[in-house]
């Protein structure tokens, strides 16, 4: 099993989860984080640290978010590893409660 970052992370990109991860499985893009399913050790410590509840075990990802399984795996191969906490975007709090923001995802 692996964990998956889903839509609530878009434009928030809080990195509290990265700080507690014991392995280098998080990768960071311009406004989103992903988890590399090969590197994830299924420890679950990141789940409780996510302030927007964006991280799920792969077998509990909501059906409407299932495409994030593939997206995490693909973008983990393209984006650099992030292994320490970074400041979130200045407007992250404004996006924390927005529910439909898939169109905001920037891959580059």
Image: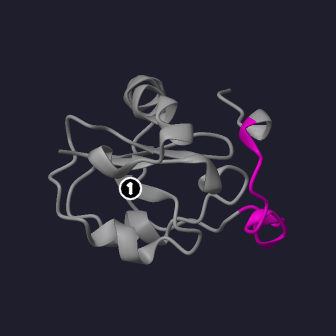
- Whether residue 29 sits left or right of residue 44 in the image: it is right
Classify mark 1: helix, strand or loop.
strand
Residue 48 sits above or below residue 89 on the image:
below
- Dot 1 alpha-carbon crowd within 10 angstroms: few under 14, some 14 to 19, many 20 or more: some
Total labels: the figure holds 1
- Whether residue 73 sits left or right of residue 54 in the image: it is left
* 17 vs 48, nearest the viewer: 48
Q: Position of residue 45 (x, y in %)?
A: 27, 71
The question of residue 92 being in magenta is answered with: yes
Residue 91 sits above or below residue 69 on the image:
below
* 28 vs 63, nearest the viewer: 63
Question: Residue at the spot x=15%, y=52% of the render?
Answer: 41
**Figure quadrant of the C terminus:** top right
* 34 vs 96, nearest the viewer: 96
* 33 vs 87, nearest the viewer: 33
Choose top left, top right, bottom left or bottom right for residue 81: top left
Q: Which residue is mark 1?
A: 56
Q: Which residues are magenta?
A: 89-102
């Amino acid at each position: 099993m692996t964990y998956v970052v889903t839509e609530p992370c878009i434009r928030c990109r809080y990195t509290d989860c990265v700080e507690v991860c014991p392995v280098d499985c998080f990768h960071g893009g311009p406004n989103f984080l992903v988890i590399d399913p090969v590197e994830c050790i299924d420890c679950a410590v990141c789940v409780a640290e996510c302030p927007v509840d964006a991280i799920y075990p792969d077998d509990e990802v909501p059906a409407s978010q299932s495409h994030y399984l593939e997206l995490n795996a693909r973008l983990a191969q393209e984006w650099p590893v992030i292994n320490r906490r970074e400041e979130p975007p200045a407007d992250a709090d404004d996006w924390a409660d927005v529910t439909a923001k898939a169109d905001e995802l920037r891959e580059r």
